[in-house]
Image: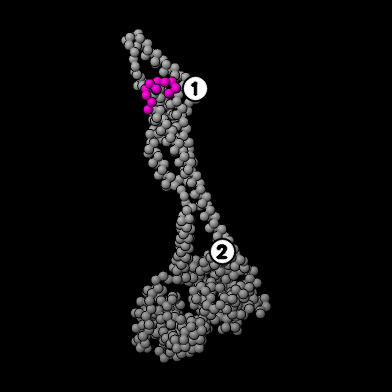
Amino acid sequence: MSLAISSDDEIKKVIDTIEVKNIVDYLQNEYKFSKEEALQSFKQYKDYLFLLIKYKKMMPPSFEIHQALKAHLFSHIDEFVLIKKRLFNGNSYLIKYQDYFESKKFIKKENKDGYEEITKPLFLKEFNENLPDFEVVYFSRKWKRYVTPFLQNLMYIGFLIVASLIIYLLAHHLSIFVA
Amino acid sequence: MYDEARLTHIKNVINVDDMAEIIEYLHNERGWSYYNAYLSCKLYKNYLYLLAKYKKNIPPSFEIYQVWRAHALIEPEDYRKMCHEIFGDESARLSRVKHYFKDDEFISPIDRDNFENITADLYFKEFGKKINVFYARHWKEILLEKMGEYKSTILKIVSTVVVPLTIYLWVSSVGHYNDLIREAHADITKAMISVSQKFEDRNIICRFSLKDQQNHNYITMLYDYHQSLTNELVKLISIVDQTYANNLITPKLRLNLLSFAKKYDHILSQEGPYICRIKMEDPEAERQARGEQIKAIKESESSLETSILGIKIKDKHDISYTPEGFGIH
């Protein structure tokens, strides 16, 4: 049974129990972050968790925080579940995973807006830290799945037409056509 | 390694999860069809079984990887619980989701080799079928995979023999087609020249003097020429029809035909006074009948001249030949 955590200090205390090694190693080894970037992302991730508990608001993370969250889930699921249970008991929707990013860009515009209107100002207010800006993707992965094979096939058909045209013109040039 | 009872338990633990939320996520966020998402979940469950049984960190296929990460991300509690149950003490190591893919390609070639040599083999050994790969694969890749070990040989044959042969056959067929066009063009031109010639000959005969035209032989000759012209026309029309049917009419030839039709429009499209397309059943009898008819007319003229007026009527009638017979103007 988890105890209710209310004060900022208590929240920070629980968050500080997250083991740095697992997440930083994962970020370095799997996502190829430098050590400084990994440590910075880890810190921002912890701050992000703090803001989620404190303000009880859904807020889209930065790309680095998002990667750190994934690293936490993938590298140490036991710890993540434990922290989630202790901190978000009853508010687990706040930490529910979403695909926020694709190629370092927000997939949805509303998440970019939420990030700029909620996450960034809160980071500035609470930690005096400026988070970077991110663009929105033009075509999400979901649509690329349909568009890419179509374009590939279109290119292939185009190639066939051009090749046939070249052979036709070549044959014509060689005076095969008399009539 | 586990005993049978433990393996059955592992299978049951894995299969008890319907993964509905994962399927929904793959469909909504990744654009997969429900069917593909469902199949991928089945593959993933089999993969988890392999991990649990062999306790090796074997690389998954792309589809399995997508389901795996989705499972950990979307349902972390369920994933953790399942891992504890099936991996036991090795849970911390085996539940770790390595970042295997960038887009749909293995990041590390070692992982790719291990997937092809270890995962695929183990999968086949355990489940008696190949590990299906269906997502984000271009049809060319699928085709190449199907070719299997003969891939390089087939590619060599295709590139060195089939492609040049296809090009050769294609060019030859174009050449053959052009030969046919050339022949058809020559036949039509010959027929057109022949029709023109016959028409000119007929014109010469038509310009004979009236006196000549009153000669019986003239009628016979005119008939023969008309018959000959008609035959040539029928022949031309037959060749043109055949050429159209064989799709051998070129724009140039079509222009020639149009120009010819324009010139001889009255022959081709109208029944001119000197044209007869109807074959006579018995030309000799016809000629004789017509000769007698002319003779009768002449006799009646002569009789009129003698009995009534007492003078000779000269060039009173201009006799011509029409499809319907003789016309007396």
Q: Is residue B215 magenta?
A: yes
Residue A178 lies, in percent from the top left, at 46, 50
Q: Nearer the viewer, mark 1 or mark 2?
A: 1
Left or right of residue B144, residue B273 in this image: left
Q: Quadrant of residue B255?
A: top left
Residue B108 occupies which quadrant of the picture? Answer: bottom right
Judge whether A133 appears above or below A13 on screen: above
Name the residue: 48% across, 86% down. Answer: A24
Q: Chain of mark 1?
A: B
Residue at image location 53% in from the left, 73% down from the top:
B62
Most extreme residue toward the top is B307
Disc 2 marks a residue whose amino acid type is Ser
- Residue B10 in sight: no
Q: Is residue B311 visible?
A: yes
Q: Nearer the viewer, residue B154 or B202?
A: B202
Q: Which residues are magenta?
A: B207-218
Toward the viewer: B262 or B60?
B262
Q: Which residue is mark 1?
A: B284
Horizontal and vertical percent for residue B118?
Answer: 62, 76
Q: Residue at x 43, y 82 (%)?
A: A64
Packing grade of label 1 (10 A; few <14, some 14-19, many >=20) is few
Secondary structure found at label 1: helix
Quadrant assignment for the C terminus of chain B: top left
At mark 2, the secondary structure is: helix
Number of numbered callouts drawn? 2
Mark pair 1, 2: CA separation: 71 Å
Quadrant of res B195: top left
Q: Which residue is mark 2?
A: B159
Above or below residue B142? Residue B82 is below
- Indicate whether residue A155 is drawn in magenta: no
Position of residue B36 relative to residue B198, above or below, is below
